Image: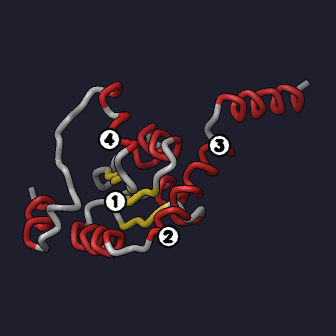
Amino acid sequence: MEFKRQIEEKELGAVFDFVGRKRVEELIPYYNDTSLFLLSLEKDSNIGKTIPSKLQTYMAAGRGIIGSIDGTSADIINRFNTGMVCNAGNDKELADIIIKMADADDDLISTLAGNCRNYFLNNFTINKYVDQILKKLEELG
């Protein structure tokens, strides 16, 4: 895997822990032990045209996001300062972002995390969806 090779070449192994696939219920300890999430999708993925559930989950956890992603998710991450992104499939730029974020100060990491959590609370909670539905019903009614 190209990404793992770059991590080894740049001697960043202490920053990453590749643990493989996990069931959802096994993820909470990992979420609690990280400062940033990596969100990557394949270039030209149809999922990239929508907001993937992973993005919502990462924002709910209140952690910053490193994104190798296009479309709506990239726009949200950029516009609301919730992390750093590069185009999907751009391994060089992704590696540069990861190195930059590994050297980032705690204030930046904290700001990104707070922005993620705030975006989640303002856009993805069940109360927000119910409010939007009720508003549309009132408009129709």
Q: Nearer the viewer, mark 1 or mark 2?
A: 2
Q: Which residue is mark 3?
A: 121
Q: Amino acid at mark 3?
A: Leu
Distance between the alpha carbons at the discs numbered 1 and 4: 20 Å
| Residue carrying label 2 | 108
Residue at image coords 81%, 31%: 136
Residue 128 placement (x, y as % from top left):
71, 35
Q: Is residue 73 left or right of residue 38?
A: right
What distance separates the C-alpha of mark 3 from that of mark 2? Answer: 20 Å
Q: Position of residue 62 (x, y in %)?
A: 51, 48
Quarter holding residue 66: bottom left
Q: Quadrant of residue 46?
A: top left
Q: Where residue 30 is drawn, which disc sits there?
A: 4
Foreground of the two, 126 or 91: 126
The residue lying at 76 percent from left, 34 percent from top is 132
Q: Percent from the top left, x then y, of residue 29?
A: 34, 36
Type of amino acid at the residue the image marks with label 2: Leu
Going from the N terminus, do you reach mark 4 or mark 3 first? 4
Q: Quadrant of the C terminus?
A: top right
**Residue 138 pos. (x, y %):** 89, 28
Q: Please state which amino acid type lies under the numbered disc 1.
A: Ser
Of the residues shown, which amino acid type is indicated by label 4?
A: Tyr
Marked residue nearer the N-terminal end (1 or 2): 1
